[in-house]
Image (cartoon, rainbow, N blue to C red):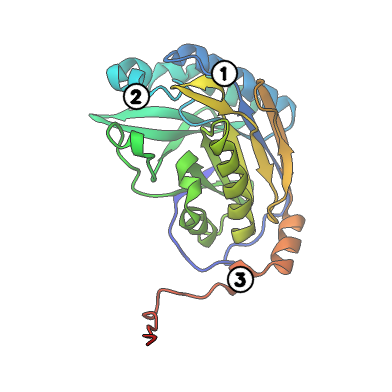
């Protein structure tokens, strides 16, 4: 797996992948503040994803501790992941044994700073990198630092742009990934019953169609950090249509095949990304109506 930082560039400069790839999205009940128990759940679901033929499995935002801002702020040594954290060993072992990579949501402590992160565990069991959430929700800003840059993963010729929850509400975030040649936008989140479900079913099809890329969401189930999560992890095609969706309240793992021929057909039919003009090069014309 090759990792690089997102840099906006010209759309379409990256060739399409030569083969399909199967991606899984996992949802389960996180145990509040219990990284060891949640890591064991992740390891088990990595093995389940591998049996289903997935090359990559995605987990919800801050799954390793649960969302749990109060617990994390009160005891970051227990509830946040640190560099070289031995509690990641079961996940590393599952990835190494199966050859399946994982994106695992965690609070991450880097010196004195806390981040909302997606940990990228390679198929060899190594922690390859982490992506730090760039758009913090209002209640998160007093606890966490915002990430400084996007992150693109390269796996089997597929370029995957990472996001975490609220990132996906900003069209510019997925567009930056698309302009870096990404073929899919991959997100771990916490979306809740009611408005959160509405948001996710509005944002993700839009991010997919606007950028003619696949979109993947792994969401929590049950209650975490005071939120009643709505589950329904899903994958959308590059035309914005749903390909797979989990139920609202049960542990579940869904898979979908990302197909380069489908990607090509949709981008031929919906050429918005190819036809995108640079709207920042000139000032906007302004006219006064009397």
Q: Position of residue 197 (x, y in %)?
A: 59, 37
**Are there few (<14), some (14-19), or many (20+) residues within 10 Å of tag 1?**
some
* Residue at the image position 30 percent from the left and 37 percent from the top: 141
Residue on which disc 3 sits: 274
Dot 3, how many residues are within 10 Å of its Cα: few (below 14), some (14-19), or many (20+)?
some
Question: Residue at the location (50% across, 14% down)?
Answer: 31
Mark 2 or mark 3, earlier in chain: 2
Q: Which mark is residue 126?
A: none
What secondary structure is found at the residue carrying circle 2?
Answer: loop
Residue that mark 2 sits on: 82
Residue 64 in the image: above or below residue 110: above
- For this view, does 279 lie left or right of residue 23? left
Separation (CA) of disc 1 from disc 3: 41 Å
Secondary structure under tag 1 reads loop
Q: CA–CA distance between discs 2 and 3?
A: 41 Å
Q: Nearer the viewer, residue 51 or 206?
A: 206
Looking at the image, the residue that sits furthest to the front is: 290
Q: Residue at x 38, y 45 (%)?
A: 134
> Where in the figure is residue 174, as x and y percent of width and height?
52, 53
Q: Earlier in the sequence, mark 1 or mark 3?
A: 1
Pointers 2 and 1 in contact (C-beta within 8 Å): no
Q: In the image, residue 271 lies at what x, y percent? A: 66, 70
């Amino acid at each position: 797996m090759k990792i690089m930082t997102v840099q906006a560039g010209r759309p379409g400069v990256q060739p399409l992948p030569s083969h399909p790839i199967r991606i899984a999205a996992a949802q389960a009940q996180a145990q509040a503040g219990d990284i060891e128990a949640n890591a064991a759940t992740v390891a088990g679901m990595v093995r389940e994803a591998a049996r289903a033929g997935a090359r990559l499995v995605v987990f919800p935002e801050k799954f390793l501790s649960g969302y749990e801002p109060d617990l994390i702020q009160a005891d970051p040594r227990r509830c946040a992941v640190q560099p070289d954290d031995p509690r990641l060993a079961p996940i590393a072992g599952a990835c190494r044994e199966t050859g399946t990579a994982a994106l695992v949501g965690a609070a991450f402590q880097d010196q004195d700073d806390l981040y909302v992160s997606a940990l990228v565990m390679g198929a060899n069991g190594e922690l390859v990198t982490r992506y730090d959430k760039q758009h913090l929700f209002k209640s998160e800003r007093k606890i966490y630092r915002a990430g400084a840059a996007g992150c693109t993963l390269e796996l089997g010729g597929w370029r995957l742009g990472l996001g975490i929850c609220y990132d996906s509400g900003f069209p510019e975030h997925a567009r930056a990934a698309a302009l870096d040649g990404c073929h899919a936008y991959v997100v771990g989140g916490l979306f809740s019953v009611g408005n959160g479900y509405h948001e996710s079913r509005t944002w993700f099809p839009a991010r997919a169609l606007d950028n003619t890329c696949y979109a993947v969401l792994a969401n929590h189930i049950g209650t975490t950090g005071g939120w009643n999560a709505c589950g329904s992890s899903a994958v959308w095609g590059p035309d914005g249509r749903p390909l797979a969706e989990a139920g609202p309240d049960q542990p579940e793992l869904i898979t979908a095949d990302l197909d380069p021929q489908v990607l090509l057909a949709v981008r031929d039919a919906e050429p918005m990304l190819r036809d995108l003009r640079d709207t920042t090069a000139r000032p906007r014309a302004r006219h006064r109506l009397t």
